[in-house]
Amino acid sequence: MIIMKKIKYLSIIFIFLLLFIPSNAKTATNDKTYLWIDYPKTSQINQTEMEVNGWVMSTCSNKTVKIYVDGKQRQEKIETRARGDVHAAIKGYGTIKENPEPGFKSILNLKDLKDGAHTLKIDVISDTGETLATYSRKITLQKYQTLLNIDYPKTDQIRQDTMEVNGWVMSTCSNKTVKIYVDGKQRQEEMPTRARGDVHAAIKGYGTIKENPEPGFKS
């Protein structure tokens, strides 16, 4: 008898809750979302720009892709486009009506970031501010590949009042400057540069002749 009363009591509470919960209440599980990233394919970034490219399919028609680096939203333009291959392959995550242009692409300018470890994060946000899907990965940024070689001085014993500093530098950075310091103080002597065909022939992977027209330097 006591058990029957408890069951009856719980049933009344359940009916009461059903009556007062709005029928249009929306939870995170109501929208099915599939986020895929095509680029970057590697976690090692060796340039001043990074392409972020992928697609998103969702039963939510009003959604936005947002891109973050180290928790800060990037303001670069995000382009969207049709992806017939995605529509043909992905089922159950909304129709072409809800996803007319599932593809997205953005070119991030990384010049403001220091070389080292960073976090790339991509969110798909609904019009109500709900996070439908998220992607995160660690990247290591080394914007410029640079190789510096010193031909002179060849010894650490200097027996005169002048010292020749002679060498070359190859880099993927086209706008670069060689600076010389003694005891932490920059020297202001003239720094002429010159072409080095031997360096261009021998050194690969550190920029082209366009980026390094005169890799040799002397002061």
Image (cartoon, rainbow, N blue to C red):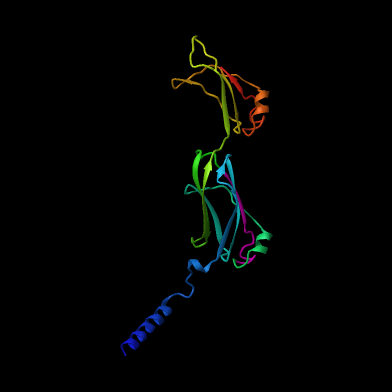
Residue furthest to the top: 160
In the rendered image, residue 118, in percent from the top left (x then y), is placed at: 49, 45
Which residue is found at the position 59% from the left and 57% from the top?
A: 36
> Front-most of 56 and 208?
208
The image shows a total of numbered marks equal to 0
Judge left or right: residue 13 versus residue 74.
left
Residue 173 location, quadrant: top right
Q: In the rendered view, would you say 169 is above or below 81?
A: above
Q: Quadrant of the C terminus?
A: top right
Looking at the figure, which quarter contains the N terminus?
Answer: bottom left
* Residue 107 rendering spot, x and y as whole percentages: 60, 46
Is residue 208 in the magenta section? no
Taking 18 as reference, is 126 left or right?
A: right
Residue occupying the point 51% across, 16% down: 155
Q: Say if the magenta span includes residue 103.
A: yes
Looking at the picture, does residue 11 appear above or below residue 81?
below
Q: Hey, which residue is sitting farthest bottom in the picture?
A: 1
Which residue sits furthest left? 2
x, y percent for residue 95: 63, 67
Residue 54, picture quadrant: bottom right
x, y (%) of residue 178? 55, 24
Magenta stretch mostly in which secondary structure? loop
The magenta region covers 94-108
Residue 100's image quarter? Answer: bottom right
